[in-house]
Amino acid sequence: MSIARVNSFAFSGIDAQRVEVQVQIASGLPAFLMVGLPDKAVGEARERVRAALTSMGLALPPKRILVNLAPADMLKEGSHFDLPVALAVLAAMDILPAEDLFAFAALGELSLDGRLNPAAGILPAAIAAQGQGWGLICPASQGAEAGWAGDMTILAAPDLLSLINHFRGTQLLAPPPPGTLGAGAPSLDLADVKGMDVARRTLEVAAAGGHNLLMIGPPGSGKSMLAARLPGLLPDLTPRQALEVSMIHSVSGMLTNGQLVTRPPFRDPHFSASPAAIAGGGLRARPGEISLAHRGVLFLDEMPEFPRATLEALRAPMETGQTTVSRAAAHITYPARFQLVGAMNPCRCGYLGDGGRECGRAPRCGEDYQSKLSGPLLDRIDITIGVMPLSPREMSWIPAGESSAVVAQRIAEARARAIQRYGEDGPGSNAEAGPDLMPTTIEAREFLERAAEKLQLSVRGQIRALRVGRTIADLAGAQETQRFHIAEALTYRHRLPQQATLERLRATGH
């Protein structure tokens, strides 16, 4: 009887948890058994391992082969267990040195001919292996991704035969090439937006402070155009943020060519997306759109068209910066510190308040449509503005506005002031900061208190108005938040832009 052990990892969110793959070959009826709560993909590894060994001219011994994935009470998911199972079997057959293998962690999916296919989660696994003092064995196509973990031994092999030759001393695997920094998608220029001074100003404030933004206007008013230009205004991710975002993308299998994500993500799911696709979950509890938008922007176009349950699932992550997928056996937490940008029409037909094409079912059409966004959700949105389209005549003579490069420079300076104030380990933006961390004059605080009472703001709404005011002060280079900074912040918050239209229509008997 012989037993071999190889290290690997299971994933709980972006955290890699150690799994020891134990293989025992003993006398008995020929069988290949796997225990330790494997899911279907893991259970099918025995057939892929058998086929891969056959392709190399090797055959499993006619004995009882038992594979245990320890700890046995943790659910094991994913095809990345193929490689550690195959290596442990080869070690139990005395083809590979068991002691040398135990100094590595292994992840990779096997093809039937023995080639190694990419697997999700290489980056967090490499970081965890480096913390344990192990090396990492992974597919050749993901060696650069593993290299971001730091100083460690990485064996990036194209196939299983190369690994066998390496450990037997007949071939030497070269170190993988260093990874590169991702450039991100090409950004659109804000200079394409003509006029719309208020909308441009609010977009700048939202970008500088990481504030949630809701734009309301008729079709063709430029809401989606403004949102698409927001990523080009945001500064690059810090090294710590880039590593965190890249780990989420790695677990999702979206990190290509070993490129680290350096630009804030921009996610724009369709309103037909399920709650699990947005908040995370599904069969294997994968990260949702809010986690893929971590440290970036989540754009919800036609926001009221999303299912109510989907929108309500955003409320807790907008406050805590994380989302939890609950299962009977475990609770999986993913980071979800995103900036929400929503766009919606004033009513279902889209023309409430438009004198030339007034809604025929006003005000009921607008009331029903706007009521799809609950009060608690709207209370978590820092800036709400109305966006009205320009006339063809205005479009012909209004000059182009400032370019994204000019506005992005002001935003970078404002964010640098915030980082200097909060420190490297403090809040990443004003939208995350507590009220005690924001220097504010006594006059400004008293003005905010009076305004909050008159406008019936909640405590959350009052704090968020203070955060927006602090961002406006940072853009102006002010050391303390002044009264007029708070006044501008309150103009973005006190009510939906179309509520005045609804009130006017009700007053006139429509």
Image (cartoon, grey):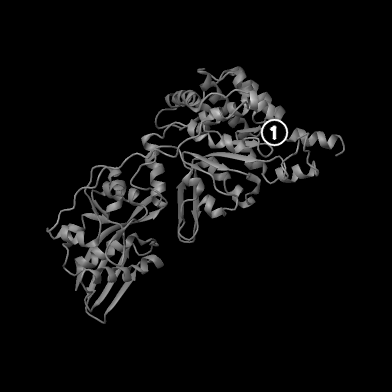
- 435 vs 350, left or right, is left
Who is closer to the viewer here, 38 or 45?
45
Q: Position of residue 17 (x, y in %)?
A: 35, 54
- Identified at 71% across, 39% down, the residue is 346
- Can residue 434 be spotted in the picture? no
Q: Amino acid at mark 1?
A: Arg
**86, above or below 493, in the image:** below
- Can residue 70 be spotted in the picture? yes
* Quarter of the figure that contains the C terminus: top right
Who is closer to the viewer here, 182 or 321?
182
| Residue 28 occupies quadrant | bottom left
The residue where tag 1 is placed is 495
Helix, strand or loop at disc 1?
loop
- Identified at 71% across, 42% down, the residue is 350
Residue sitting at the far bottom: 29
Residue sitting at the far right: 509
Q: Position of residue 234 (x, y in %)?
A: 47, 32
